[in-house]
Amino acid sequence: MIKMRLLNGQPQNRISMADRAFQFGDGVFRTMRCTGGAIEFWARHYSHLEQDCAALGIVCPSASILLEDLSRLRPVDAVLKIIITRGETARGYSVPDQLLPNRIVQLAALPAYPEQLYQQGVKVRVCSTQASWQPALAGVKHLNRLENVLARREWHDPDIFEGLMLDRDGFVIEGVMSNVLVLSDNILSTPKLEQSGVSGVMCEVIFDAAVQHGLQVEKRAWTLDEIKQSDAIWLTNSLMGLLPVSDLCGRHFQSHAAQLLLSGALKQLRQKEKFAIVDLAGMTKG
């Protein structure tokens, strides 16, 4: 449930029906975890937001403006979401010059992830809804998430935590709400996102942590059969962190020693890469 929302820095729960986000899903967003009044991995999130805006040709608000907006939400332990829309236009796809983007920041309660999920792992299925190819949008967290919506509608079993999405050639791309990490022969890898998928901050963080601890990493194409034969699989996003998979379509995975290594490294990086948004003196450095 959304507790508070600002539109262009002002409290507002409505947006114009002429906004292109409403009309076409024309915009981008990023979701962040805030603990103790500090945003985890803020610099990375903003960098991804800038890249996503650039991919769509949208002017990204400065970090200082967004941080000022976020500070007005007065978050302590919360989910923070930034949405940037292209702005408001009449009907039609064409984009006028000098269009002013709209920025929305919102605060919600942190979801609870029971510790047993991290100890025992989660059950995952494969979705029939495919991740479609569009290289121009590959990696971008844009507002049109219809594929993810359709994929998530495929199951109602509460024991299934996540669904994997494949592309038209049968390669694993991502989870409905997560990125995928695979450990095989002591190499940590994640699917290539050259044609589709979302480039997630947490996946990037885990990759960096793995390198710092001497693990070899790579991005490669994985078929479903190949991923089933791997040593371990994890799901990642900015809220749940690093979550092990215990069952993928009936293939069972035992807890792997790398789980302890990577989760410990993630804990350290979470502390190292926090940005206290109540520290107004540091906001302009964001």
Image (tube, helix red, strand yellow):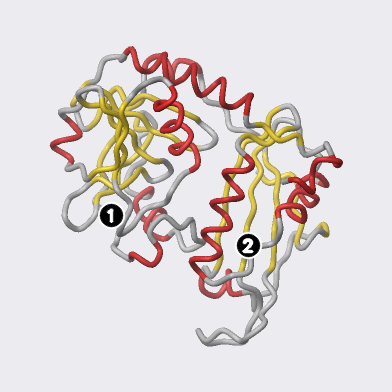
Residue underneath mark 2 = 84
Where does residue 79 sit, x and y in percent of width and height? 64, 39
Label 1 amino acid? Answer: Thr
Residue at image location 70% in from the left, 44% down from the top: 107
Label 1 sits on a secondary structure element that is: loop
Label 2 sits on a secondary structure element that is: strand
Dot 1, crowdedness within 10 Å: few (<14), some or many (≥20)?
many
Label 2 amino acid? Answer: Ile
Where does residue 29 sit, x and y in percent of width and height? 57, 55
In screen coordinates, is 253 left or right of 77? left
Label 2 close to label 1 by CB (< 8 Å): no
User: Mark 2 or mark 1, which is nearer to you?
Assistant: 2
Q: Earlier in the sequence, mark 2 or mark 1?
A: 2
Where does residue 157 sit, x and y in percent of width and height? 35, 35
Q: How many marks?
A: 2
Answer above or below: position of 156 versus 216: below
Q: Nearer the viewer, residue 49 or 117?
A: 49
Q: Nearer the viewer, residue 13 or 233?
A: 233
Residue at image location 79% in from the left, 49% down from the top: 284
In screen coordinates, is 187 left or right of 137? left
| Mark 2 → mark 1, Cα distance in angstroms | 27 Å
Q: Nearer the viewer, residue 283 or 76?
A: 283
Dot 2, crowdedness within 10 Å: few (<14), some or many (≥20)?
many
Residue at image location 22% in from the left, 45% down from the top: 221
Residue underneath mark 1 = 129
Assign the N terminus to one quadrant of the image.
Answer: top right
In screen coordinates, is 274 left or right of 49? right
Answer above or below: position of 137 versus 234: below
